[in-house]
Amino acid sequence: MLDRLQAFFDQHSRILLTTHENPDGDGIGACLGLAHYLRFLGKEARIVVSPSLPSNLHWLDTEGWIERYDPAGPHLELAAWPDAWLLVDASEPHRLGAMYPAFESTKAPRACLDHHLKEAPRGFEQEFTDPKATASGELVYDLAAPRMGLPLPVSMAEAIYASLISDTGNFRFSNSTGKVHRMAAGLIEQGVQPARSYQRIYLQDTPSKVKLWGRALERMALLGGGSFGLMVITLEDLRECGATHDDLDELVQEPTRLASVEVAGLLYELADGRIKLSLRSKEAVDVNAVCKLFSGGGHRLASGAKLDGPVLAAKARVEAAVLDQLDRDLSRI
Ligand SMILES: [Mn+2]
């Protein structure tokens, strides 16, 4: 697969790198890692993101390469610029969000580089996917490191390290393979400072966010004899705390702090009145099966779905479905 990706780069000279809307540390880290590599190959590369670069990832962009998508201004003619368009860390074109119309109209060949386990990608001329990889940044490292030689430039190593810590929850999740740890060790030997990366990516909360998380935890319902911790956040909660939907990122993990909790859940109101559900499982319970009931998905230990409001009705449906799944999966142990 990496040889095919290399051939794709060899055939093109102006490569546009994009990632899914509301980019995360893996998408950004992988795009920056690729931009370093493409410059090493003597290619022109641009990175355009929508709607913006999260503030805790700004420091990774040491060269100021990342452009914020602005279709009314500098990106009016974006579709005409590249001779190849690569979507990184996603394999469904609609995840480009606001950039999708430009993607659809470009004459350049389109490809994706991804590691998620979903259906076969559609809407691309070429696809580079490896569901065994933990992060898109892992694929970038495997491509670039042997071809560039070590050590990588420190800012490139930091970008790839950011990919790894973002998709493994700082090496906590079940996808933290031996290979990922060996890769991280190599990146540290090449100049990454783990404490600095951790602080800059994770220890960046605002008082509004901490207030919101406090409210969610204080009101958490413990169901199924303590095995299911469910939190609910309404638009009113966001307003009262001065917080935004971005502040809910990773909140869903929090109930798993409790020894008794097998499944953690978060329900929150979206601006359009629909209700977003996120579920996490420690190990025994298949939360993907629950989310599928609501036309959502993901994988066994981490899944999501959208439900119709109002929030209390959605909560009742989710409670029933999760308790049912707990019965089914825990009785097997
Ligand atoms: Mn990823």
Image: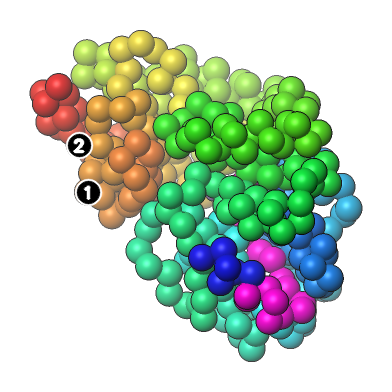
Figure quadrant of residue 310:
top left
Residue 314 shows in the view: no
What's the residue type where badge 2 is placed? Ala
Q: Kindly identify which residue carries mark 2.
A: 321
Q: Give the SS element for disc 1.
A: helix
Q: Is residue 4 depicted above or below 143 in this figure?
A: below
Q: In this view, does 193 lie to the left or right of 102?
A: right
Q: Give the SS element for disc 2.
A: helix
Of callouts 1 and 2, the N-terminal one: 1
Residue 90: % across, % down: 52, 60
Say which residue appears at 11% left-offset and 26% top-offset. 332
Q: Which of 41 and 259 is in front in this view?
A: 41
Residue 297 shows in the view: yes
Asked which colour scheme the image uses, the reply is rainbow
Q: Is residue 62 left or right of residue 193?
A: right
Q: Give the range drawn in magenta.
A: 7-26
Say which residue appears at 55% left-offset and 17% top-offset. 214
Q: Is residue 182 depicted above or below 299 in this figure?
A: above
Q: Does the magenta stretch include residue 90?
A: no
Q: For the view shown, which residue lies furthest in the right direction?
A: 63
Residue 210: % across, % down: 63, 21
Say which residue appears at 73% left-offset and 64% top-offset. 48
For residue 185, the mark is: none
Residue 45: % across, % down: 78, 68
Q: Is residue 31 left or right of residue 223?
A: right
Figure quadrant of residue 315:
top left
As measured in the structure, the alpha-carbon distance from the residue carrying label 1 to the one carrying label 2 is: 8 Å
Q: In this view, does 329 lie to the left or right of 299?
A: left
Q: Kindly identify which residue carries mark 1.
A: 293
Disc 1, disc 2: CB below 8 Å? yes
